[in-house]
Image: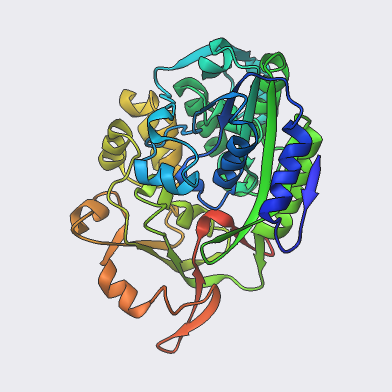
Amino acid sequence: MIYRSERGLSDDSIRYALQENLGNTEAKKILVIPPDFTRMYSGAGIITAAIFDLLGDRCEIDVMPALGTHAPMSREECETFFLGRVKYENLIVHRWRDDVVKLGEVPAEFVREVSEGLVDQAIDAEVNHRLVDGGYDLILSVGQVVPHEVVGMANYSKNIFVGCGGSSMINSSHMLGAFYGLERIMGRDFSPVRRVFDYAEEHFLRDLPILYILTTTTNTGDKTNIHGLYIGRSRENFEAAVADSQNRNLITVDEPFKKVVVYLDPREFHSTWLGNKAVYRTRMAIADGGELIVLAPGVEKFGEDPENDRLIRKYGYVGRERVLELVKEHPDLSENLSVAAHLIHGSSDGRFSVTYCTDPALLTEDEVRGVSFGWMPYADAAAKYDPAVLKDGWNTVDGERIFYVSNPALGLWKRQDN
């Protein structure tokens, strides 16, 4: 079922929608799979809290955030995101390297067909074993549909196969997207990666009691506006959410950006693994020879786990062609293709400059320059490009026209000709 509001659904409307769809459930044991705090504007925390209010007294409810490769949530993040309704001690941590079972594989010939011959190998469909052997009567996959660099439009079965997936599926899907090309994927539904997920959903998830609860959102300051709530199993629900998100979160600009400044909220962005949304969500709008300045006061590392961080520090954001060469030359990178894909996503391929502005007490100039980014102290950058003063869109700073983005996670910016 679909619920929409141009101004944003009220808390009462959200509770009504959940009551209408879940109020009569006979499920005794439920698994809720929301995103983590890095999707703080998804509305999923509000929805998860409302599920507890509705069903917590009569059902056993477990919560396992769809971490994918991300770091586990902190106690403070859990308390804030789920409005105090989920106990931090009860969160199930998905370990993408260890906790998975293989359900089957997407055949090589299918992958070859959807990738136009760019990839010619089978892809394992893996999920956290709890989805299969946890004894759940109902699995609620909650999350936001928004433009995405790997799959085109986030959520639906991606929440399962990446958020709760294993290293093989994560690595293969990320590299498939990188091979196919960011510009051909972002903001679109039927990408090669999405077709792989569709195949796996149809063939390997059909017997699992999954119900998708999808949102489309914008934000007003810290307030999340949930414009659409899409509850059901069918792909048609997802497609309706895709169309809504494309209308709200895909911004076409009339002229290319010569200089764009992007702010990374320190509550949400602690790594370049996440913060590079600043790079790939704006790259289709940036002019050749342009400049991207990333205000990153909370960024303190590159990868979300120690091994990924080590590999990023070792190889750096050196461009698509060089990364592909490195994959052939170095087993540690070829065995971690999601990192290779991330290095491709985070590079401008020499088309525009990228300057990260960090707190040197968290991430030093040498560290940032060591991965092939430019660097500026955050304090200096924020004094000139003050996030408290700049407004989303065009601004003039010291006589220079710049474009400002306060939250790259909620949009995709592109020129008319992209």
Residue that sits furthest to the bottom in the current view: 399
The structure residue drawn at horizontal position 62% and vertical position 61%, both measured from the top left corner, is 414
In-image side of 81 versus 299 (left or right): right
Q: Position of residue 288 (x, y in %)?
A: 50, 65
Protein image colouring: rainbow
**Residue 114 to residue 363: above or below:** above
The total of numbered circles placed on residues is: 0
Residue 409 in percent (x, y) is at 53, 54
Quadrant of the frame with the N terminus: top right
- Asked if 142 appears above or below 259 in the picture, the reply is above
Name the quadrant containing residue 296: bottom left
Of 363 and 121, nearer the camera is 363
Vertical relation: 227 (above or below) 30:
below
Question: Seen in the image, is 276 located left or right of residue 11?
Answer: left
Q: Is residue 418 visible?
A: no
The foreground one among 233 and 105 is 233
Question: Hey, which residue is sitting farthest front in the picture?
Answer: 57
Q: Is residue 26 left or right of residue 316?
A: right
State which quadrant residue 2 falls in. top right
Closer-to-camera residue (306/141): 141
Residue at 76%, 34% (x, y): give it: 21
- Quadrant of residue 338 within the rendered picture: top left
Which residue shows up at 75% across the image and 52% down it? 244
Q: Is residue 384 visible?
A: yes
Q: How far across and how far down the image is residue 53, in percent?
A: 60, 39
Q: Which quarter of the rendered picture does the C terminus lie within? A: bottom right
Identify the residue at image location x=64%, y=18%: 28
In the rendered image, residue 352, in percent from the top left (x then y), is placed at 44, 62
